[in-house]
Image: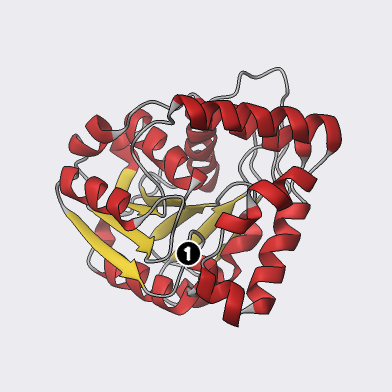
Amino acid sequence: MQLYTRSAGSGLPVVLLHAFPLSSAMWLAQREGLAATCRVLTPDLRGFGGSRLEPADEPSLDLMADDVAELLDREGIEQAVVGGLSMGGYVTMAFCRRHADRLLGVILADTKAAPDTEQARANRERIAGEVVATGTDVLLSDVLPALVGPTTKQRRAMVHGRVRELVRSAPPAAVAWAQRAMAARPDSFETLAALKAPALVIVGDEDELAPPADAEAMARVAGDTRLRVIEKAGHLSAVEQPEAFNAAVTDFVRSLPAEGARARG
């Protein structure tokens, strides 16, 4: 699986994994704002944006994490900061389980380490089935409202409209596949407890899907961790408050040893 990837900048590599049901297009402000600090790589996870989906493959976050490891191989990168927002955070935690030796640092934004409840799993399956049967309208009614916070809805109409269009363009097959992959994810608290690399946990103070309490729980478990709460941001904190998000990432990246980024081969 060769992931379509947008990149910018140079220096220490930072891989950012997008939220559901968006694509790497959500990271535009990060590619622009972080390029002076690091080399930003933003892949489309399988099935989204420009990346293919193999329907025969069983839905799996582990498979998505392995795709990211293959991306690093292709780019000649031995170690990198790997992070993600929402679903991208779930993939990042799977990467931590499977490729811990390749981590210079970890960024977990607006995500959670706990697995889905039975009710949440059932809701994912309902949405997966409906999207395949009737298209993406269910995403606009059932997913979009919780993706951004009330401040964005009230004051940032252009941001809300951009998110809406990204949601509307999500491929139904990829949506269903990713929903089932997320529904099957394990508890990741032990993964975070075993983490050797430094971690940055970011959360919007208006996030309803992965609220600050979830971020605090992750930060308590992981060892070398800093927690940043972004004001007036909901679930898509990187899109809603890009300057604050970029500042948190910049501070984190600058705290890491640059010599840790080794080339492979």
Q: Would residue 123 be found to the left or right of residue 228 on screen?
A: right
Image coords of residue 261 (percent x, y): 33, 54
Is 242 placed left or right of 261 in the picture? right
Depth check, front residue: 63 or 185: 185
Identify which residue is drawn at 70% across, 47% down. Answer: 139
Instruction: Find residue 154 and report its image quarter.
Output: bottom right
Q: Is residue 89 rendered to the left or right of residue 151?
A: left
> How is the structure coloured here?
secondary structure
- In what quadrant of the picture does the C terminus appear? top left
Residue 245 percent location from the top left of the image: 41, 70
Q: Is residue 175 above or below residue 31?
A: above
Q: Residue furthest bottom?
A: 155
Does the rendering let one see residue 76?
no
Amino acid carrying label 1: it is Gly
Dividing the picture into quarters, in which one does residue 226 lie?
bottom left
Question: Dot 1 corresponds to which residue?
Answer: 234
Q: Is residue 13 visible?
A: yes
Above or below for 265 versus 262: above
Q: Is residue 151 left or right of residue 220?
A: right
Q: Secondary structure at mark 1?
A: loop
Q: Residue at point 64% right, 42% down?
A: 3
Q: Residue furthest right?
A: 134
Q: Residues within 10 Å of mark 1 (few under 14, many from 20)?
A: many
The answer to which of 173 and 71 lies nearer the viewer is: 173
Numbered marks: total: 1
Say which quadrant the N terminus sits in: top right
> Residue 67 placed where, x, y %?
55, 35
Q: Percent from the top left, x then y, of residue 187?
A: 33, 29
